[in-house]
Image: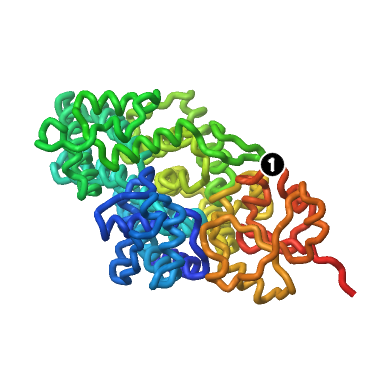
Amino acid sequence: MLLLALMAGLQIWSAIKESQVWDEGFELGSGYAYLKTGRLRFNLEQPPLAKLLAALPLLYLNPRLAVEDPSWINQQDIEFGFSFMYHNRVPADTMLIAARSSIILLTAALGFLMAAWTRRRFGNGPALLAVALLAFDPNILAHGHYATTDLGATFFMFAACIAWDAFLGSLRKFHLVLAGTLLGFAIGTKFSAVMLLPAYAILYAIRWWQQRERFTLLHFAGSLLAVAAIAYMAIVAVYLPEAKFFVPAWAMKRPGPPLATVVNCDDTAAELLCWAGGIASLQANSFYHGLNNFIQHNAGGHLSYLLGQFSHNGWWYYFAVVFLVKTPTADLLLFGILLLGGLSGLFRNGFRINILRAPSAWATIFIPAVLYFGLSMASRIDLGVRHLLPFYPFFFIALAAGFFALVKSRPPWTGPLLILVCVLLAAESLSAFPDYLSFFNLVSGGTWRGPHYLLDSNIDWGEDLKKLKGYINTHPAPQYCLEYFGTAEPPYYGIEHLGYVARTNQPGERKDMDCMVAISVTLLYDLYEAPGSFTWLRARKPVGHVGGIWIFDVRKPHD
C-alpha cells in the first residue's frame, strides 16, 4: 500500500504541474458530452468507457457544454476540446485535475489487482517486486495521470485476463460472467482489446491439455460463446443510449440506418465486419462506426518517427525499439538475467521445453503479453509507448515471479542483486521526476538522446506549457519565441507576446530573430512540419529544456 500511495502522490504532483496533453481536451469533452446528452459526436475511434470515467467528476463541477458552438455542430473534435477547456465557466486546470484524479485512482486499482493476483499465484515476494516495478515505472507514472484512454485499457485488459484465469480455475458461473463483463469493458475502452478473445481461447486450450478430466470440447465452445455474448452485452451497456441499434434490424418495427452507412464495405480490412453485418442484419451505431474508423486508421497508417526516419506505414520493429529505450534500465537488467537463466536451464535440459506443462499462472501472464506485443508490432499506428502500456503489467509480474523462481535456491548474490535492481529502479525513476513523459532510460542515453529514437507522445505531447511559464519566470528575457506542439492555450498560462520561430528556408526572418526560442522537440525534429524546417536550430546547442520543450538562445549581442 505504501508503494501505491507513493505512486499516487508522484502522479498527483505531476498532474498539478502539467498542462493538458494533446488528446485530453477533446477526449474529456467527448466523455462529458456523452454523460450530459447521451450522444457520441467526437473521437469515435476511441470507445467511450475510459472517457466516461475521467469525465464523471465534471458532473459535480458542471462546466458549460456549448452545443451551439460551430465545433459541436460540425463535429470538429480538436476545436471542440479547445473551446470546452479554455472558454468555459470552470477553469481548465480545475477540470483537468478532477478528471486526472479518476485515472490516478484507476492506476492505483491496477496496482492493487496486480498485488492481489501475484501474491495468490506466486507469493509475497513476487507481488511486492511486481508492484514496485509498476510504481516506479516512468511510463506508468506519466500516462497513469492523464485523462486519456491508455491506462483504462491497461486496467481492464489485465483485469479481464485474471478474471478468465479465475474462471478456468473454478469453472464458476460468477467468474465467467466477470470475465465476459471485463472483456466487454476492455473493448469498450480500446478496440485493440479484441485480442483478448484469442487469448482466452489459447488459455482455455492449455488448461484443457493439462487437466483433460475437467474440460471438454463442448464446455470449451460453450464457455467461449457465453463469454463473447456477455462481453457483447457489456459493450451495449457502455453504449447504452444506442442500445436499440445493437439488435438485428429485423427485430425492430422501425430499424435505424443499416451498417453500410457507417462502415466502408469497399475496404478489404472491413470486409469481415460488413459480412457479419449482412448475416446478422446489423444496424449502424457508434460502436461499429468507431470500429470502422479504427480499421481505416490502421489501414492508412499514421505519420510517425523512428531513429531519424519518417513513415506513414510504420515499422514492424517500432515497438521493439520503444521497449528497449523507454523501459527502465532495472527492468532490462532483470529481463537479461532471466533470459540468461532460461537459456542456461534449456542447455542443462538438452533444449527440451514443454510450455503446455508449465503452471497455468505462467500462461496467464505470457499469452496475453506475447499476443498484445505481437499485435502492436503488426499495427501501422506507431505513436508511442502509451500504446504498449497493456503489455507492462504482465511483463512486471513475469519479471518478479521469474526472478524469485530463478533464485529460489538463494545463492549468495541474490540479495545484493535484488538491492541493486531496486536502487537502480528508484534512482532512475526519481531522476525523471516530474518529467515522466520525456523519460528515456540510461541505456539509451537519457532524455537528451530521446529525439534520436522517438518523438510525439514518447517525449513531447504538449504537457509542458505550465512548466515553461515557470522557466520564463526564472529565466527572464526581453523576448521569447514559441513553437508549441499541443492543444493547451499559452495565454491561459500567462505566456503572451511571443515571437515567431523562423524556418530554415527563411534566411531573412532567421537573421532578424532576437529572442530565446522555446520549441517542442516534436516540431524541432520536423515531425508534422515540412522536412528540414528547423535544421538550422538543431545545429545549435540548447541551453536547457523543460520536459519536451527545448530552449535555445538566438539573441543578438547587445552593447
- Image label count: 1
Q: Residue at x 59, y 35 (%)?
A: 311
- Assign a secondary structure to mark 1: loop
Apparent side of residue 200 relative to residue 408 in the rendered image (left or right): left
| Residue 452 location (% of width, % of height) | 67, 45
Q: Is the C terminus in the top left, top right, bottom left or bottom right quadrant? A: bottom right
Q: Is the N terminus in the top left, top right, bottom left or bottom right quadrant? A: bottom left
Residue topped by disc 1: 531
- On the question of residue 121 being in view, the answer is no
| Residue 455 location (% of width, % of height) | 60, 48
| Residue 516 location (% of width, % of height) | 73, 66
| Residue 345 location (% of width, % of height) | 48, 33
Apparent side of residue 396 relative to residue 484 in the rendered image (left or right): left
Apparent side of residue 217 relative to residue 357 in the rendered image (left or right): left
Say which amino acid is labelled 1. Pro
Vertical placement of 445 versus 367: above or below?
A: below
The picture quadrant where one finds residue 179 is top left
Give the colour scheme of this rendering. rainbow
- On the question of residue 295 being in view, the answer is yes
Vertical placement of 232 versus 156: above or below?
A: above
Report the front residue among 263 and 279: 263
The picture quadrant where one finds residue 89 is bottom left
Report the front residue among 263 and 522: 263
Q: Residue at x 73, y 55 (%)?
A: 502
Vertical placement of 379 versus 119: above or below?
A: above
Report the front residue among 148 and 410: 148
**Callout 1 environment at 10 Å: few (<14), some (14 to 19), or many (20+)?**
few
The picture quadrant where one finds residue 424 is bottom right
